[in-house]
Each structure stands twice: as C-alpha cells, then as structure tokens.
Amino acid sequence: MEAPLTVTLPDLAATGALAARVAPLLRPGDALLLEGPLGAGKSAFARALLRALAGDPALEVPSPSFTLVQSYDLPGGLEAHHFDLYRLDGPADLEELGWEEARRGLVLVEWPERLGSRRPADALMLRMAYGAGEEERVATLSGWPDRLKDLDA
Amino acid sequence: MKCGSAVLGLESSCDETAAAVLGADGTILAEAVLSQEAEHSPYGGVVPEIAARAHLDYLPRLVAQVMERAGLGYADLAGVAATSGPGLIGGLIVGSTLGKGIALAHGLPFVAVNHLEAHALTATLPGIVAQDARGQPMPPVRFPYLLLLLSGGHCQCVAVEGVGRYRRLGTTLDDAVGEAFDKAAKLLGLPWPGGPALERLARQGDPARIPLPRPLLGRPGCDFSWSGLKTAVAHAVARCPGGVPSAQDRADIAAGFQAAVAAVLADRARHAIAMLPDATALVVAGGVAANGAVRGALAAAAEARGLPLVAPPVRLCTDNAVMVAWAGIERLRLGLTDALGHAPRPRWPLEELAA
C-alpha cells in the first residue's frame, strides 16, 4: 500500500512550482490523470506542466474543453496530448480522439472518470481540491511510489 | 441565375450540421441548419462520437434539400466549399469528404474552408443585411475591420484586412468565453447550452450584490482570460449557506458573471480598436454575440470610438453553412481552390491562411 503525497498549494504560483517539479519525472508512454471539481485548477496544473516541459513560460495552452484534446510537440521529441473528457459519453468515444496513438506519447487527462476500462493502471494520479482560502489548493499525488520519492526530496 | 455560378457550402465542425447554396453575388438561395442540441443535452455538452454519426446521417439529406429548394442541379454550381478545420475531427472528415465527393463526381473545384475565416468574412456578405446592435440595418462592412469571435471554442480578436489576410491581435490565455458561460451555468445548475439559460436567469439578478473578478481588465493588449472568473463563480456558489445557493443567489451570481464578462469584453474591444486605428467597424460573431448584455457593452465601446458594432443576425453568428459558402465564393474569386487530398485540420490558426 503506497502512501499518497499531499502538497498544499497556497496560490497559483505554487501550482506552477509543483508542475515544474513533476515535469522532469515524465516520460513517453506515461499517463497523468487529473481529478477534481470544476475550477479546482486541473487545467492550470496541466498548463504549467506543459510550459515547464516546453521550456517556454509563454506557451499557449488553451483549454481542451471544446476540442477535447490539444496536442503538443515538445523538445526532445516528446509528444504530449492534453485531454478533457468531461463531455465524453464513455470509453468507446476515445477511439475517435486518437487515444491509442496518443498513449505512445505523454497523456494528461482531465475527467479521467470517463476512461472506464481504458484507464491506465500505471498512471500518476493528481487530485486537486479546494483549500482553506480562495487561492489555496491541496494536491494529492499517488500511483508512482518510486518516482514520487524523488519529488518528496 | 447564371448557370455554373452558385456555390454549395457545408458545415460540420462541431454540433451543427448545415448546408447552404449561395449565388455568386452572395444571394442566399437556400440554407438549412440542423442543431444537434437535443441529442447532446443529456450529456451536458457536445459528444464527439454522436456528433460525427449525426453529421453522417443528416448532411447528405440537407444537401439534397438545399439543392432542391434552390432549384439547382449540380451543373449549376461553380464549386463546393466545406469547413475543413478547426473543429472536431470526426465531423470535419464527414463534411469535407462529402464535399470532395460531390466536387469529384461533378467535376467542380473544391474549397477547404477555415471555419474562423468563414466567421470573419460573414460581415462582408451582401444580400443579407447585417444589423447594428439596435437591430438597425447596415451596409456590408469594408476592410479592414475588427472581428471579435466569441464562441464556445474560440475567443479571439482579429484584424481582418482582406480575404486571406488576418492578424490575430489577442486570444484567450485559457478558456473560451462561451466555455466560461457553459461552465458558470453548470455551476449554477442550469441545463446545457448554458449561455441562453444564464442570460435568462441574470435578468432576475442584481449584478452588484456578489462581486466577481474582471480578469485582465485594463491590461494592455486584447488577450482574454476566463478561468479565474469561472473559479470565482464556483467559490460564490460554495459560500452560499450550506453550499446551496437560493434562487436569488443564483440569479445574482448569474447577473454578476454576465456583467463581468461584458465589462471585460468592452475593455478588450477598446484596446483592439486602438490597435487597428483605420478599422471601419467592430464585428462580433460566435454564439456569445447573441447575449444582449455583451452586445450592449460592445456597442457602447465601439460607439465611443466612432465605430459601428456590426452583429450579423444570430443565425449567421452561430455556426452555419451560409458563411462557408460565402468564404468559398470569396476564395474562388481569387482562384483559390484546394486539392481533393486536402486533409481536415482540427487545429488551423487563421494566420496560417494565405490568399
């Protein structure tokens, strides 16, 4: 039984700092599942993460809510795919979004509940929750005991 | 009607299936739009698989219908134009493939239309009368003009300098404005589509009682950011006793949200006007352009700078095929056609278009 790692994020800058620490742990074929209610900061985390991976703090990272997936060619040949599955009916619709192909790169998935049986067993889970103040968030990471050890240090 | 001069337009990039036939001068000979709203509402949004299947079901029938209503055969066409991006890939494939098939079968040129360009050029469409914010008829606008594209998937400000000549002046840093409406509506427990329901609710509310942030207001440029406003709505709902807003709370939050959006859009529009001093008009398109408070605020911002606000009729502001056929006509006039091998593009920024 692995213990999840909980990080209190006082503001958006702290979310960005956490994303920058997670970024070096990611490799092609990885899946990062982002959970939490509307407005909790899932997209904000994904945006900060993609910017850290791109080495470009001004990288345009539009919300994938309308297009359902936004893809990025990152330095070092890494392809990342940012999914928002909120509007998806079920896992069968994933095919149309190119899910299998996307899995060869890095996938960031908002509303992973919709993945059903396609939910990767070896994913990193990040749950965003509202904290004490309006700005504060609490991030809970789980699923990668080996790699998260490095994060904790 | 001169033979061989009409253009058939097809639209299937999101949740509307549409076909239209326009004469070479822009006269609308026939148009049909089928909204998939009813099929989508149980899911709270556009479901892509349903969208692609429904486009496949309906589009061929709509094409037959508009051709019949226009009283034309395929020999009367000068070309076929189909939205080929940006949008949901399933729908784009259905529409562009049908368009190419018709073009191939009848020896017609094919035009792969950029959906954003189609919105951008709607204001130049003669034959339909654009109206200003008070519903007064207006002549078609001249280049250059400013376009604010405000929809569920797009939120950008574009300098339209000619056919194929577009400069993006600003865009959203996070959510599209229509998406912000939909998500705020969802937080307020309203049914999809959220925009019209939120506007109705806002009429009973006091916009001043629950203050909400106005992201980027007063900042240079004309970028947009709506994510923080959405989160503020979530907080406002959570702060209500027991986390359950009363009917009045919901109306007040809706009104406050709408007022914040309108104020930010007006501020961004003022900046955009300053960035394109020779603009002849401020044109607004996209579903959010149907919102009365937004139109009013933009009209005031434009008028203060001596510009008319041009808002095409709502049916031509939201997704439709008239605009696609018109963009096709404009491109055909310049001799711009596309190969049948043209691949639909889910992402297709306006600036990558060249006339």
Image (tube, coloured by chain):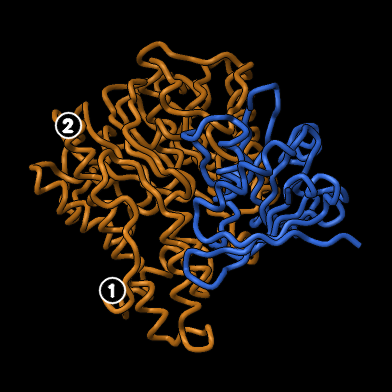
> Closest to the observer: B280 or A66?
A66
What's the residue type where badge 2 is placed?
Ala
The picture places residue B221, in percent across and down from the top left corner, at: 27, 38
B94 relative position to A96: left or right: left
Q: Residue B279 has which mark?
A: 2
Residue B285 appears in which quarter of the rendering? Answer: top left
Chain letter of disc 1 in the image? B
Please tell me whether mark 2 sits on a helix, a strand or a loop: loop
Depth check, front residue: B45 or A59: A59
The mark total stands at 2
Q: Residue at x 42, y 79 (%)?
A: B250
Q: Nearer the viewer, residue B199 or A60?
A: A60
In the rendering, at what x and y percent does residue A37 appear?
61, 65
Label 1 Cα crowd, 10 Å radius (few <14 / some 14-19 / many 20+) = many
Instruction: Quarter of the image for the N terminus of chain B: give it.
Output: top left
Q: Does residue A136 appear to the left or right of A73 in the view shown?
A: left
Q: Where is residue B233 shown, x and y percent of the image? A: 44, 69
Q: Which residue is mark 1?
A: B207
Mark positioned earlier in the residue sequence (1 or 2)? 1
Disc 2: which chain?
A: B
> Looking at the image, can residue B41 be seen?
no
Which residue: 41% across, 43% down? Answer: B172
User: What distance separates the C-alpha of mark 1 from that of mark 2?
Assistant: 32 Å
| Residue that lies at the very extreme toward the front in this rendered image | A153
Say which residue appears at 35% left-offset and 22% top-offset. B330
Chain with orange colouring: B
Between circles 1 and 2, the one closer to the viewer is 1
Neighbor class of circle 2 (other Cα within 10 Å; few <14, some 14-19, many 20+) is many
* Chain A on-screen colour: blue
Would residue B147 be seen by someone viewing this image from the given angle?
Answer: yes
